[in-house]
Image (spheres, rainbow, N blue to C red):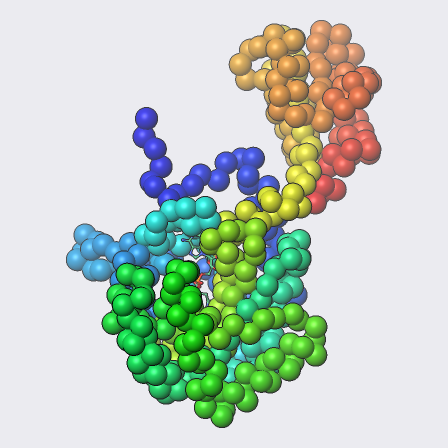
């Protein structure tokens, strides 16, 4: 047997309804906030991610699916979408004058991580990017959108953690002070944190190791090293959040795993998820456009992990799958096939899903199959039905049977009290 690649997952027909629900809800709420959808290619030139995400980040260092194509170009399967969106905005000149751009996306991403619950090598994200405003109002608008998305999905119990990591100047100052502190405690740090001390010391603040956490309790606080403007910005974001009843927790150790962030950063966490408790995260990236050779364009955005959201919804048992309406056309003689096809095609033309036997099964076996397929109705076409041009319609819910002339089937099924027409089922 050939199995799927480690860390990838099939989304099977029984799971598709919950995916459809999540995707549909995310799209609908995004449109309420005036965001337009963008779809970028799954593969990009490697340089799109190399510097923008940070050469010392885990993603660039060890998690990218990078390969040389047959033409010798270095290609990477996107590990995140913000850099792709920035590339696309610049390439397609989507931003002109003093405009603001509101974009959202959904799609698969690839990271070579160690698979575990909620962590895959191919996973999916919804993301939103608000481009063109440096003001704290933009931060609040993006958090209002994120909150509304999460709540519309039915997730009410979660924590929004926020922090400010200032501008690159204040961050560098803080980094030096943090490194000085951590070097003093070097011998007690975990192996991973020791390694990070050289390459990416801020990420040590994220460490889940117990001993590290003990040391970090005494570590200098990044918020105390912010410059005046950064502080003012962060204070105003908090004020607006409070005034608009958005609950949040300030977490000065929240730094995020990508280098392009500055000022406000945030994460959505749920206890339901266990170790991988973040189901979404984002922040400002005011300096990212410049790395693509553009003028300075401030922006803020976030992404939600769809698999993690679905894990939460499954735990909450919130998603009740409506049974799809379906008519099974059963028939007693293979020679009736053209009549059966014509009935099924007519139902389909009127948006009533229908299937019929294609294995020449006995009527008894067809009725069993109709049950297995969860049919709402079974239409029986036998000798008498053909003679009278009336089908026997069996309601699979209560087993009642009625005789309906072929030409009245659509009308009857549409009026039948079962929300049968696909249009009524949405
Ligand atoms: P991120 O924090 O790397 O941010 O990913 C966002 C979310 O994607 C995470 O909170 C998590 O739910 C999900 N996720 C990440 N890695 C995996 C994985 N291996 N398996 C399953 N789910 C995963 C970003 O990607 C930024 N581009 C977000 C952003 C947009 N910032 C500004 N704009």
The quadrant of the rendering that contains the N terminus is top left
Residue 411 visible in image? no
Please name whichever residue, 112 or 11, is drawn nearer the observer in this view of the structure: 112
The quadrant of the rendering that contains the C terminus is top right
Give the residue displayed 71% in from the left and 19% down from the top.
379
Query: Toward which corner of the image does residue 358 lie, by quadrant?
Result: top right
Residue 38 visible in image? yes
In the image, residue 205 sits, relative to residue 343, either above or below, namely below
Give the residue displayed 39% in from the left and 60% down from the top.
209
In the image, residue 149 sits, relative to residue 424, either above or below, namely below
Please name whichever residue, 158 or 394, is drawn nearer the observer in this view of the structure: 158
Query: Toward which corner of the image does residue 68 lie, by quadrant?
Result: bottom left
So how many labels did they put on this image?
0
Give the residue displayed 22% in from the left and 60% down from the top.
74
Query: Toward which corner of the image does residue 16 lie, by quadrant?
Result: top right
Task: State the residue lying farthest toward the bottom.
Answer: 228
Residue 56, x across and y down, in percent:
28, 68
């Amino acid at each position: 047997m050939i199995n799927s690649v480690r860390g990838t997952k099939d989304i099977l027909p029984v799971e598709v309804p919950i995916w459809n629900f999540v995707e549909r809800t995310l799209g609908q709420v995004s449109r309420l906030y005036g965001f337009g959808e963008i779809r970028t290619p799954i593969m990009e030139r490697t340089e799109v991610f190399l510097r923008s995400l940070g050469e010392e980040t885990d993603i660039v260092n060890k998690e990218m699916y990078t390969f040389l194509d047959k033409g010798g170009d270095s290609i990477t399967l996107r590990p995140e979408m913000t850099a792709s969106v920035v590339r696309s905005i610049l390439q397609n000149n989507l931003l002109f004058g003093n405009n603001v751009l509101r974009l959202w996306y959904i799609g698969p991403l690839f990271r070579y991580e160690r698979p575990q619950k909620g962590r895959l090598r191919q996973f999916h994200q919804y993301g939103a990017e608000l481009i063109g405003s440096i003001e704290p109002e933009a931060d609040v608008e993006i958090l209002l959108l994120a909150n509304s998305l999460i709540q519309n999905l039915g997730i009410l119990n979660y924590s929004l953690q926020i922090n400010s990591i200032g501008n690159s100047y204040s961050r560098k100052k803080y980094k030096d002070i943090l490194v000085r502190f951590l070097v003093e405690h070097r011998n007690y740090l975990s192996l991973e944190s020791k390694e990070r001390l050289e390459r990416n010391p801020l990420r040590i603040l994220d460490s889940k190791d117990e001993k590290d956490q003990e040391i970090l309790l005494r570590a200098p606080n990044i918020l105390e090293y912010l410059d005046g403007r950064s502080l003012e910005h962060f204070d105003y974001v908090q004020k607006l959040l409070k005034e608009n009843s958005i609950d949040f927790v300030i977490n000065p150790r929240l730094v995020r795993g990508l280098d392009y962030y500055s000022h406000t950063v945030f994460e959505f966490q749920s206890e339901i998820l266990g170790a991988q408790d973040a189901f979404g995260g984002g922040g400002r990236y005011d300096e990212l456009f410049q790395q693509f050779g553009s003028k300075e364009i401030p922006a803020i955005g976030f992404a939600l992990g769809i698999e993690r959201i679905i894990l939460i919804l499954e735990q909450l048992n919130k998603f009740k799958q409506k049974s799809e309406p379906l008519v099974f056309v059963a028939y007693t003689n293979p020679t009736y096939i053209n009549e059966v096809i014509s009935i099924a095609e007519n139902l389909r033309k009127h948006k009533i899903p229908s299937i019929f036997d294609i294995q020449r099964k006995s009527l008894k076996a067809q009725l069993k199959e109709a049950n297995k397929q969860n049919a709402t109705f079974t239409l029986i076409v036998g000798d008498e039905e053909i003679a009278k041009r009336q089908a026997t319609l069996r309601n699979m819910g209560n087993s009642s049977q009625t005789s309906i002339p072929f030409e009245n089937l659509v009308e009857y099924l549409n009026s039948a009290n079962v929300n049968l027409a696909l249009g009524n089922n949405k």
